[in-house]
Image (cartoon, rainbow, N blue to C red):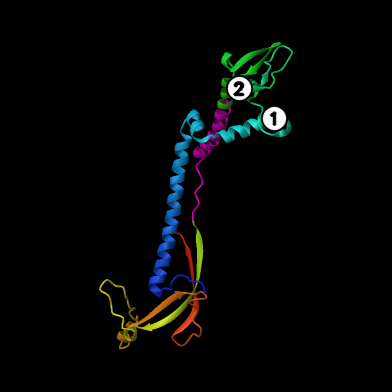
Amino acid sequence: MANGPTPVDLGFAEFATQLVAELQEAVVAAQAGQDDRRAELAELAAVGAAQFARRFVTNDQIDAELTRLFPAPGGKGHRIRAGLSYRSAGATRSEAPPLQTKLGIRLGARDLRASGKGRAALTQNGVKTVREAVRLRLAETRLKALRQMAAQGMPRVVVDSGRVNVKLSFRLVDLDKIGAQRAKGGAVVPLTPLAGGKAGDRLSRLRLVVRQVNEQTAPATPDAASGIGELDLTFKTV
């Protein structure tokens, strides 16, 4: 048989208290995480396009965009490389490939070298110019979306209501019979009967103990002092 975690008995009050406390911690942590994310997005929306491009636009993303804009023959990769034949636009001819037209850039003398017959070839510096133009273009597109989101107000997800259902084994324990002592720190906290009376002292030594049910912890035969049931906790935020 596989070894599992050692089952732990807890007082019913402690179990319910811990369940509610951890539920609250989870909700608070989720809200704090959202606040951190909102602040991070607002900070990113305030940076310049050039800084955003350097930090968040990767070379793989640039290659993907170049493949979309200037696909290589056969659809594998892109054509932007040193030595690429380039023809500028003229009175009766269009630019080929349309680097300046599509990217809104101007290629300089260092970006092209003459290759004869009125044509030119893209240099390594020209490849860098094209890639940086694509990097900035991608950054500006993303920044526009971020700034629009920041201006409109980013949505916040909140917990409206929920339900927790736990299957438990219940056992009534006589603290006197098991030799349990009342700890000074309150480790054992007996319940005080609402009605008081002579039975108060006796009932104060009885304790309801619970354990989560699985194949290892389910009692084989429940008796008068034990049983199996469920804790169904419904909650909502206020």
- How packed mark 2 is, by other alpha carbons closer than 10 Å (few <14, some 14-19, many 20 or more), is few
Reading the image, the residue beneath label 1 is: 72
Is residue 147 one of those drawn in magenta? Answer: yes
Q: Locate the C terminus by quadrant.
A: bottom left
- How packed mark 1 is, by other alpha carbons closer than 10 Å (few <14, some 14-19, many 20 or more), is some
Q: Disc 1 residue type? A: Ala
Most foreground residue, 140 or 130: 130
Q: Which residues are magenta?
A: 133-158
Q: Residue at x 44, y 75 (%)?
A: 211
Is residue 137 one of those drawn in magenta? Answer: yes
Left or right of 219? Residue 186 is left
Left or right of 117? Residue 44 is left
Q: Residue at x 50, y 29 (%)?
A: 49
Q: CA distance from mark 1 to mark 2?
A: 21 Å
Q: Residue at x 59, y 17 (%)?
A: 111
Reading the image, the residue beneath label 2 is: 104
Q: Disc 2 residue type? A: Gly
Q: Is residue 159 above or below residue 127?
A: below
Q: Which mark is residue 228?
A: none
Q: Residue at x 58, y 27 (%)?
A: 131
Q: Give the structural element (helix, strand or loop) at label 2.
A: loop
Q: Give the structural element (helix, strand or loop) at label 1.
A: loop
Q: Are marks 1 and 2 in contact (CB under 8 Å)?
A: no
Most foreground residue, 87 or 232: 87
Most foreground residue, 168 or 124: 124
Report the magenta stretch's main SS.
Answer: helix
- Residue 23 location, x and y as percent? 44, 62
Point out the frontmost of discs 1 and 2.
Answer: 1
